[in-house]
Structure formats: C-alpha cells, structure tokens
Amino acid sequence: MKITKFDVRAARERLELSPEALANELGVKPRKVRAWESGAAPVPERARKFVEWRLALAEWSAGLEACGLPACEWLEAQRQAFGNNPGDARRMQLAHMVKAHMESCDVCAARDRWASENLPPLPAPPPNHALRALLAASGAIDHLPPWARPAAWSALVTGAYTALQVLFMLPTIIREPARLLESAGVVVLAALAGVAGGLAFSITRPVTRPLGTPGNYLGGILSMAAYVGAAIFMFPLAGGGPRIGGAADTVIFAFVSILFGTIVGKIIDENERITQVA
C-alpha cells in the first residue's frame, strides 16, 4: 500500500489514532503529521513503512481475534505494561520474553497454529538504523558457541561505549591528528577488556547459576573484576601512564568491581526472572 497525503489520514483514522497519537508513535511533532496529511510536506520513508506496518499488524490482529480461541492473559499483561510503542531496547526485551513464553504456553501454541494456517506471516516492525545494526549484530552473535556469546556482547557494548566517548574528543583529534590512532587503540583495548569480562562470566556461570539470586550478583561482580583487571593490565598500552598497584589501588579495584558488578548482577538477575516467568 503506497501512502499518499490522503492515505496518511485514511490510515490514521482506520487505526483509530489522533494526529497526536500517531505523532507520538512516530516520535515526531503533531504538526508534522498534519503537514503530511495536508500535502505541505512529503511523507518520509520511515514514517510510511511504520504506518504500513501498523495497518498490516492491525489486520493480522483482527484476523486472530476472530478465530474464537482464548487470548493469553500473560501476553495481554505484557502488552499493557510495555505500551503500544516501546523504545528499541524495551522492544527487544519484550521480543525475548515473548519468545521464551511461547515455547511453554499451550494457549499461545494453539493461536500460533491457527494463525500459521489461516493468516499471512506476522509483519515485522520496520527497525530504525540503530536497531537494524543491533539486530544484525545480534544475529551474528547468535551463531557463535554459547560460551563465546557473553564475550562478544561485552566487547560490543564496551567498544561502542568507548567509541561514543571518543566522539567527544573530535575537536582535539582534529587539532592533533596523531591522537586518532591512540583513540582507536583505546576502543580496541576496551573491547578486549570486555572480552575478558564476558569470558569470566562464561567460565563462572556454571558455578554461580545454581546459587540463584546471590549467584547472579556474584557472577556480575566476578565478570566486572575480570573486565577492570584486564583494563588495568592494558592501561599502559594505551599511553595511559605507568601500571598502577599498591594497597590503595587494590581497594579502588575492589570497590569498582563490587559497585559496578552489583549493577551487572542485577541485570543478570532480572533477565533470569524474565526467562523463568516467561
């Protein structure tokens, strides 16, 4: 379906959305939607694909509701909790939860069988550039052995975070081009430290997982200790000065590992709870 200036209004009304509601889902100002509908501004491709996806999803959902099979109460609760237009990170979290849930839910299995026999495939939401890159990375990492996936994710996150920090140094790098190679080295070393943290998680996970919540926090602390330790070891390679050591530095190392490791442990624990509930 090609969206024209009239089609945008027709699609919005078919979805029973106000200009403000559609603008909120698209992350734009309501005046933008009104400009598309009046023809004062062209409809961006991203907006067109999103509206087409919402229409296809509405038709698919209407067909599924007409099947007469009972709806899954768990899915309905998650839909209300996440809202109609969650952010990219929340959307991926929801997708993970739904995938885990549907493997053990008889109600969802029955509706899924009916949909596969009577409806076209469920349309996938059009990802933005950031989510598209994240999905591509996720697909590549899923092909790795299970023990290597935490290391790959950790390297990706730490490397990307460090690269983002390097962006703030662009004015300095422009004035001193020689620092570009140094900055690139910092990103690589950060990713390697992330590999160390991820491998520590994989190695210790068989021991920490049976311990439940305490084990999840312990795993986070051990992983963070490996990451920080690797970063400290490689610190001189990035031109950061002499190696650090001594009692005071040991205390700082332990404090940082426990503090941020606890945060990582909380994330691990929440993901475990999500998987168990699903």
Image: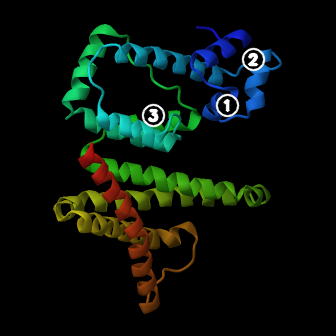
- Image spot of residue 154 (x, y percent): 41, 54
Q: Is residue 183 above or below residue 132?
A: below
**Mark 1: secondary structure:** helix
Does residue 231 appear in this view? Answer: yes
Residue 29 location (% of width, % of height): 73, 34
Residue that protrudes farthest toward the right in the picture: 40
Residue 30 found in image quarter: top right
Q: Which mark is residue 23?
A: 1
The residue labelled by disc 3 is 136
Q: Secondary structure at mark 2?
A: helix
Could you give the CA–CA distance between mark 2 and mark 1, rounded to whole angstroms? 12 Å
What residue is shown with label 2? 37
Name the quadrant of the C terminus. Answer: top left
Tell me the amino acid under the disc marked 2.
Glu
Residue 140 in view: no
Between 8 and 245, the one lying in front of the other is 8
Labels 1 and 3: the sequence-earlier one: 1
Q: Position of residue 18 (x, y in %)?
A: 66, 26
56 vs 37, left or right, is left
Q: Quadrant of residue 186?
A: bottom right
Residue 41 percent coordinates (x, y): 80, 20
Q: What kind of residue is marked 3?
A: Ala
Residue type highlighted by circle 1: Ala
Crowd around label 1: few <14 · some 14–19 · many ≥20 (10 Å)? some
Mark pair 1, 3: CA separation: 28 Å
Give the mark toward the camera: 3 or 2. Answer: 2
Image point (38%, 13%), residue name: 63
In the displayed structure image, the side of residue 105 where residue 222 appears, left or right: right
Vertical position of residue 82 compared to residue 180: above or below:
above
Q: Nearer the viewer, mark 1 or mark 3?
A: 1
Q: Earlier in the sequence, mark 3 or mark 2?
A: 2
